[in-house]
Image (cartoon, rainbow, N blue to C red):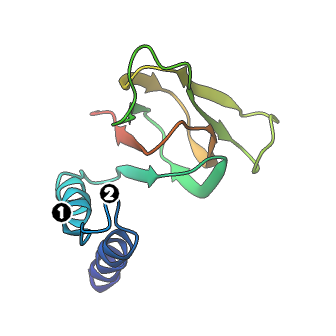
């Protein structure tokens, strides 16, 4: 539990220090948003937030049984030509199997069932702005 608390504190500190918005914004709004997302997490869930791409994170250990993958692009509009592209990879930036393209979309949000297991990297190939990716284990 101590390790989890340290990770949450680190995420909150990073969100506050890297605040978004105007120069008068102290970052507290962004830190509160991160705190809400962390509080809403379920056991075994993976949450990835970012502002830039390309970016490879992990590896994460995906357990058998599958996941519900959700993505959000808070600033995206349907008319945007910019697309969020995310893939799961067995080694960073490789299409060796298992490889799975999760999303290639200009939509602001979406959901998809994912049937994978094992140690995989999440590769954000392209992102037009900030994004939130969430992998929730399917109920068994």
- Quarter of the image where the C terminus is located: top left
Q: In the rendered image of this protein, does residue 118 appear above or below residue 65?
A: below
Q: Residue furthest top?
A: 79
Secondary structure found at label 2: loop
How far from the left and from the top, in percent, is residue 61? 54, 53
Answer with left or right where residue 116 lies relative to residue 112. Answer: right
State the image quarter where residue 14 is shown: bottom left
List the residue tagged with mark 2: 21
Please give the name of the residue rendered at 27% of the width and 54% of the height, measured from the top-left corner.
43
Please give the name of the residue rendered at 20% of the width and 63% of the height, measured from the top-left corner.
35
Q: Residue furthest front?
A: 23
How far from the left and from the top, in percent, is residue 4? 31, 76
Please give the name of the residue rendered at 34% of the width and 68% of the height, measured from the top-left corner.
15
Answer with left or right where residue 27 lies relative to residue 65. Answer: left
State the image quarter where residue 32 is shown: bottom left
How far from the left and from the top, in percent, is residue 106? 49, 20
Number of the label disc, if any, that sits on residue 125:
none
State the image quarter where residue 103 is shown: top right
Q: Please tell me which residue lies in front, 116 or 87.
A: 87
Secondary structure found at label 1: helix
- Quarter of the image where the N terminus is located: bottom left
Answer with left or right where residue 62 lies relative to residue 131. Answer: right
- Earlier residue among tags 1 and 2: 2
Which of pointers 1 and 2 indicates the residue nearer the eye? 2
List the residue tagged with mark 1: 32
Mark 1 Cα shell of 10 Å, populated few (<14), some (14-19), many (≥20)? some
How far from the left and from the top, in percent, is residue 19? 34, 66
Q: In the rendered image of this protein, does residue 78 appear above or below residue 86?
A: above
Answer whether labels 1 and 2 touch (C-beta < 8 Å). Answer: no
Q: Please tell me which residue lies in front, 80 or 138.
A: 80
Please give the name of the residue rendered at 63% of the width and 48% of the height, measured from the top-left corner.
120
């Amino acid at each position: 539990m101590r390790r989890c608390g340290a990770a949450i504190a680190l995420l909150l500190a990073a969100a506050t220090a890297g605040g978004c918005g105007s120069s008068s914004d102290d970052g507290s709004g962004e830190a509160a948003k991160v705190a809400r997302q962390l509080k809403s997490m379920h056991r075994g869930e993976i949450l990835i937030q970012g502002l830039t791409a390309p970016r490879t994170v992990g590896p994460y250990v995906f357990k058998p049984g599958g996941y519900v993958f959700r993505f959000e692009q808070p600033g995206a509009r349907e008319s945007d030509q910019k697309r969020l592209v995310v893939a799961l990879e067995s080694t960073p930036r490789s299409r060796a199997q298992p490889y799975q393209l999760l999303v290639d979309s200009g939509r602001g949000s979406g959901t998809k069932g994912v049937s994978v297991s094992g140690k995989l990297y999440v590769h954000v190939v392209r992102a037009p702005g900030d994004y939130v990716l969430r992998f929730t284990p399917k109920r068994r």
